């Protein structure tokens, strides 16, 4: 996903990219990317800066953390950053990491946005994905998916070794 800087115009350019997760080297445990990653980005050249704004979108197949069913999760993420072009490489080695700025030499003719797109996808994957807010998960006793049917299990009695502590707590409340 490369932008040719030489072709940018002050009035703006619109780009559309579509690449597979394999081509972009995106991988996450328990996540499949069945369709290409789509990117729409607009660039505006203003002096020595290129203002980039866009959107990354895709649908991933992911496992629900409660019921373990596989479901489709749409991923939509905004891209917004500025590319600063400098005359000398002195400013390029300042060591500062800024999410909003990329610093490149003026002699560079192509800018690859793949890292920005990769970060936008991976950072928008949920830590605990849910197929729905109403997901009831699995029965801890028999393992049946409670979204599909109810089970006849009764909750386990608490561990008897804790009864003495419970008795002490109950005495303090009286």
Image (cartoon, helix red, strand yellow):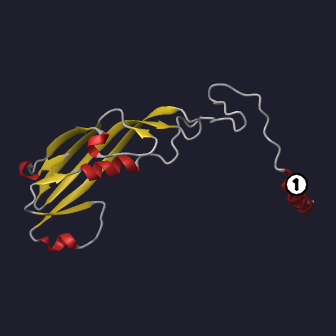
Number of residue marks: 1
Q: Give the position of the N terminus as an image quadrant.
A: top left
Q: Quadrant of residue 61?
A: top left
- 160 vs 86, left or right, is right
Q: In the current view of this chain or complex, which residue is farthest to the top? A: 149
Q: Which residue is mark 1?
A: 163
Location of residue 30 in the rendering, given as x and y in whole percent from the top left corner: 46, 41
- 1 vs 73, left or right, is left
- Identify which residue is drawn at 67% across, 34% down: 143
- Identify which residue is drawn at 15% across, 51% down: 44
- Identify which residue is drawn at 82% across, 48% down: 158
Q: Nearer the viewer, residue 25 or 87?
A: 25
Q: Quadrant of residue 40?
A: top left
Q: Give the position of the C terminus as an image quadrant.
A: bottom right
- 40 vs 62, left or right, is left
Residue 86 drawn above or below residue 154:
below
Residue 117 drawn above or below residue 38:
below
- Identify which residue is drawn at 83% across, 44% down: 157
Location of residue 150 in the rendering, given as x and y in whole percent from the top left corner: 70, 27
Within 10 angstroms of label 1, few (less than 14), some, or many (20 or more) residues? few
Location of residue 15 in the rendering, given as x and y in whole percent from the top left corner: 17, 41
Element type at marker 1?
A: helix
Location of residue 14 in the rendering, given as x and y in whole percent from the top left corner: 16, 42
């Amino acid at each position: 996903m490369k932008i040719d800087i030489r072709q940018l115009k002050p009035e703006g350019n619109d780009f559309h990219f579509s690449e597979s997760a394999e081509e972009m080297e995106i991988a996450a445990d328990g996540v499949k990317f069945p369709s290409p990653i789509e990117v729409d980005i607009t660039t505006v050249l203003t002096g020595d800066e290129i203002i980039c704004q866009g959107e990354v979108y895709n649908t991933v197949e992911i496992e629900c953390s409660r019921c373990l069913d596989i479901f489709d999760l749409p991923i939509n993420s905004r891209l917004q950053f500025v590319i600063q072009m400098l005359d000398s490489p002195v400013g390029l080695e300042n060591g500062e990491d800024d999410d909003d700025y990329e610093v490149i030499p003026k002699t560079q003719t192509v800018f690859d946005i793949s890292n920005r797109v990769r970060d936008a996808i991976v950072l928008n994957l949920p830590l605990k994905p849910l197929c729905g807010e109403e997901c009831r998960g699995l029965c801890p006793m028999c393992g049946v998916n409670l979204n599909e049917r109810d089970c006849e299990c009764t909750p386990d009695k608490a561990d008897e070794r804790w009864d003495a502590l419970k008795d002490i707590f109950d005495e303090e409340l009286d």
